[in-house]
Amino acid sequence: MINFFKKKNTDLPDFWVNYENLFVTKQDQKLEDITFVVLDTETTGFSYEEDRMLCIGALKLIKNNINVSTSFEIFIHQDHYNQQTAEIHGILKEGKATRLEELETLKLFIAYLGNGVIVAHHAGFDVTFINTALERHGLPKLKNKILDTSTLYKKTLIRSNLLHKKEHYSLDELAEKFNISVKDRHTALGDAYITAIAFLKILSKLKEKNISTLKQLLRIY
Amino acid sequence: MKNTISHRVADFLKNYPPFNQLLLEELQELSTQISIVYKEKDAIIFNENDAPHSHFYIIHKGAVSLNKTQTNTIVDICDEGDIFGLRPLIANENYKMEAKAHEESILYAIPITTFKPYATSNREVGNFLIDSFASNTRNPYSKSHRGTLYGEPESTEIYNPSTELLDLQPVKYSKKLVSCSPKTQAKVLAAKMTSKNVGAILVLEDKMPIGIITDKDLRNKIVTGQLPISAPASEIMTSPVITYSKKLTITQAQMAMIKSNISHLCLTKDGTVNSKAVGILSKHDVMLAVGNNPTVLIKAIKRATRTKEIKQVRKGIMMLLRGYLDQNIPMTLISKIISELNDACIKQIIKNSLAKLDTPPPVTFAWLALGSQGRSEQLLHTDQDNALVFEDVAPEDLEETRAFFIHFAKQVTQRLNVIGYEYCPAEMMASNPSWCLSLSEWKKNVTTWITNPGQDEVLLSSIFFDYNNVYGNHDLVSDLSDHIFKTAKNYPSFFLHLASGALQNPSPTGFFRQFLVEQDGANKDSFDIKRRALMPLTDAARVLLLSHSIKSINYTAERFEKLAELEPNNAELFIAASYATKALLKFRTKQGLAHNDSGRYISLNKLTKAEKIKLKRTFRTIKEIQDLVYIRFKVSTLLR
C-alpha cells in the first residue's frame, strides 16, 4: 500500500507538484495577508458525473482590493453539451470565445489559484466539479481552504424568533440584500464578482460580531 | 485582458466625465488596468500628508468624505461618479486632505500612469481636468492652481475652512435643457413646461439662446389676454437672455439674480449669448444649494423622479437637522419637521415606484411605517420597519394580489435602502410575505397577538402598534385601528403582558448608580441609549395610552403630554417623562450626527461631566414611570 502512494506521487506532473509545495509552509491567519480566490463555474448541468464545466471565472481579493487585470476567465471546450442549461449561462457549443481543453484550463487555474483561500457561493458545487475534472485527468483533489458565502451569510443574520431563516440563500438573494447589480449574472466571472462583493460585505458584518480571523471563518462550518 | 469585470467597469465609467469623452475601445482598455477597492464605513483611503498613491479614485458605490483632520471639518462629500485624489498625483505633492469612507463604499482605483496618456492626447479630457482644478470648482484647495495642470504648482495657500465655502462651490444646474423653437405655440410650450415640471423654458435658435419664457411671462402676456394661446414663442419670450458661463459659483449666481431681478439664468458654453446653451439655473436651484429650509427641501423631494435625487435631498435634511440642533430649537419642533421631511421622501419613493409599475395596483393599499419611524422619532437613518395592508379580495385572487404587492414593496424597500435606510435585520418589511397582508389577514394576526400574548406576540405588537400610515388608503388603517381597540378591550390581560414587556428592558444604571455598559460584541463598553433609556419610556407610553384607547398619537413625548392631560393627578410625572424623552432623543441624535451612525451606542469616556449628569437625571424619571406601570397593570401577578 505504501508503495502505491509513493508511485502515485512521483507520477504527478510538475505543475501539480509545484502547487502542492505551496502548502508545505503554514499559511497566514490574518485576513489582510490572505489571498482570497473568489470563483464561479458555469456547467452543463448539476450532475457531477455526466455534466462538464464550460467556464471557470475567478478573481483575486487581497486587502479588500480586486485587480481587474489579474482576473481569470477561461472557456472550456467540452464534447458534452446540454441545450437546456445553455439558456441560463448563454454559452453556445460553438461560440465565438476561444476555448481551451479541460486539462489545459485546469493547469492554468491551478497555477492561478496557488495556495489562496477559495471563496464561492455554494462552494461545494463548484469545488466538487473542479475536483471531478481533476480526477478525470488522474490528479488529486484541491488542497485549498474553502469558504462558502451562502453559509457565511447565514451567520450575519440576527438570532430572533421573528426571523424565519432559510436553509439556503441564493446569490440573487444576497445581491438583493447588499444592493449589488446583477447585470452579469450567470457568467462565471460576473457571478464571481457578485460573490466577491457580497463576501466583503459579509466580512464587515461578521467583524461586528468579532469574527475576524480565518480560523474563525472556517469554524463556522 | 478584457473580461466580464472590465466590461462592467467600463460600462460604469462611460457615464461620468472625463471618461465619457473617451472612445469605448479606450475605455475598455483602461478598465482592464483598474483595481476595485472595497472600503468599510469610516475606513481611511488616504491620510492628510500621505505620499500620493499610484492611482486616483472614482466612486462606484457609496460616498467618501474629504476632511481636514486638524480642524476636524468635512470639506466635501463625494458621491457616485465623483473623482478624488487626482490632483496630488498630477501636482506631485502629498495629499492635502484625508479621504474617509462616509458610507460603505466601492471605489475604482485608476493608475495614473495608464490614465495620463489619455489626458495629454485627448483635449476634452485635459480640459475637464484643468476645469476641475480651476478655482470655481468644488475643490477649494486648487484655488492657486488654475490652469497649472502639468506645470509646477505655486505655493499652496493654507486654506481656512471657516471662510465662506459657498463662494467657491460651483452651482449645480439642470443639464437637461427644456427648450423650444421661436415658432412653438404658447399652449404647446406650456404643456411641455408642465410635463417637465419647470418654471422656465429656453427659446433656442441654432442651439443659441435667443429668449426665455418663464411662468411670469405666461401670466403677464397670455393669461391677461394680451396674446392668444396660439402665439409663437418669439412673441412671448423675454429677450435677450441674460447668460453666464457654466463656471458660475453659487454666490455669483445669487448676485446675478438680485442684480437683474430675474429668477432664471441661462448658462452657455463661454458665457455669452453667442455660444451653445448648456443649462438653465433657477432661483430654486440656488436656494437648494444654499438653503436648507424645509419648504425648499419638500419642493425638491416632490420634484424628484429618481432615487438618486432624493438621496441628495436627504443630505440637505441632515444639514438642516444639524443646524436646528446647534440652534437649540425645541426637540418637538425638530422631530416634527424632520420626520415630515423623511415621510415626504418615503412618500415620493412610493409614488415613483408606483409610476414605474407596468400595471396599477389591483386594489387600494396603505403603506405603514412601524417602530420608531411610525412614532416620528426617527431623525437619523436607522433601519426600515414597514408593512403593507391591502384591501380584501376574493380568496382565489389573494395570492396573486399579494405577489403583486410584494413585488412592488421590494422595489420600494430597495430604493429606501439606496437613500440610506438599512434593511430591517428581522425582515420586518413589506417585502416579506408575512408583513404584506390583506386587511382581514392583519385583523386576524392582531387578534392572535392580543388573545395569546406570548413573548414574541408582545414584541410584535409593540413594534406594530406604533404604525403610521405613510401612503395610501387611510380607511384601511383606521379600520384596523378600530379593530385593535375593540379586541384589546375584551382582553384586558393583553395590557398586563404589554406592560410586563415594557418593564423588561435592562436598567440603565447599576447599584452604585454607575452606567451599565454592554459586556461584549462590537459595542462593548458603550452605553446602549436606545435599549436602556429610550425604550422603557416608549414602551410605557404605548401601553398607558393604548389602555386609554387612543391611537392617533404616536410620538412618545406627545403621548406623555396627552397622558398628563388625561390623568391630572399624575401630570407632573408625565410631563417629566415627556421632557426626558425629548432630552434623550436629542442626545441620541447629536451623538449620531457626530459619529455618522444611528447614535444608539454611546462611548461614555467621550461624554463630558455635564452630559453624564444630564443623562442620569432622566433615569430617575424612567424608574418612576416603570413603577407606575408596574402598579397600574399589576404586573407582579405575572411571572416576569
Image (cartoon, coloured by chain):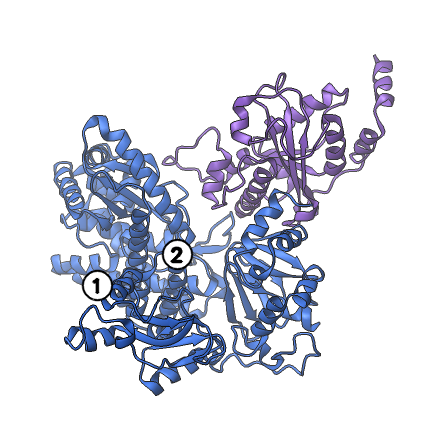
Chain colours: A purple, B blue
Residue indicated by mark 2: B381
Q: Secondary structure at mark 2?
A: loop
In the rendered image, residue A163, in percent from the top left (x then y), is placed at 39, 36
Residue B252, image quadrant: bottom left
Name the quadrant of the C terminus of chain B.
Answer: top left
Chain assignment, label 2: B
Q: Quadrant of the N terminus of chain B?
A: top right
Residue B566 in view (yes/no): yes
Establish whether labels 1 and 2 are both on one chain.
Answer: yes
Q: Residue furthest top?
A: A1
* Circle on res. B319: none
Question: Label 1, on which residue?
Answer: B575
- Position of residue B317 measured from the top left corner of the image (x, y, whole percent): 36, 65
On the rendered structure, is B232 left or right of B18? left
- Asked whether residue B508 appears in the rendered view, the answer is no
Task: Give me the chain letter of mark 1.
Answer: B
Q: Residue B433: where, in percent of width, then height?
A: 32, 35
Q: Residue at x 62, y 28 (%)?
A: A126
User: On the rendered structure, is B559 left or right of B417?
Assistant: left
Task: Report, in whole angstroms, how far the alpha carbon at label 1 lies from the one at label 2.
Answer: 28 Å
* Residue lying at 54% horizontally and 81% vertically, measured from the top left: B160
